[in-house]
Amino acid sequence: MNIKQTLTLAAAATLASPLALAHDGSETASVAAGLLHQLTGLDHLALLLIAGFGLSRLLKRRRRSAEKSSRSDARD
């Protein structure tokens, strides 16, 4: 993903975020409710899944790159 695509995606996400209406204020009822919301709120769960998927793809890409580099070093 190049920088133009990244900036376009970031701008779209920023402009679309008010439409989500993810927080209705109920998580401010108590400290426990606020902390529990981080684990049970659908918006947070979706973010964790997306971040985990993206991180796993990044790590796989880096691992392949490192393996390819070590193979070429071993041949030299």
Image (cartoon, rainbow, N blue to C red):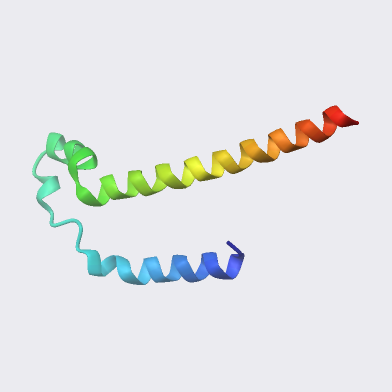
Looking at the picture, does residue 17 appear above or below residue 35? below
In the rendered image of this protein, does residue 8 appear above or below residue 53? Answer: below
Location of residue 61 by image quarter: top right
Q: Is residue 44 above or below residue 1?
A: above
5 and 18: which one is in front? 5
Say which residue appears at 14% left-offset and 34% top-offset.
32
Which residue ends up furthest to the top in the rendered image?
74
Quarter containing the C terminus = top right
Horizontal and vertical percent position of residue 59? 55, 39
Identity of the residue furthest to the front in this view: 75
Left or right: 53 with respect to 48? right
Residue at 24% of width from left, 69% of height from top? 19
Indicate the quadrant where residue 71 lies. top right
Image location of residue 48, percent across then percent down: 34, 44
State left or right for residue 13 relative to residue 74: left
> Which residue is drawn at the image coordinates 56% and 39% (left, top)?
60
Is 72 displayed left or right of 9 in the figure? Answer: right
| Position of residue 33 in the picture relative to residue 10 (left or right) | left
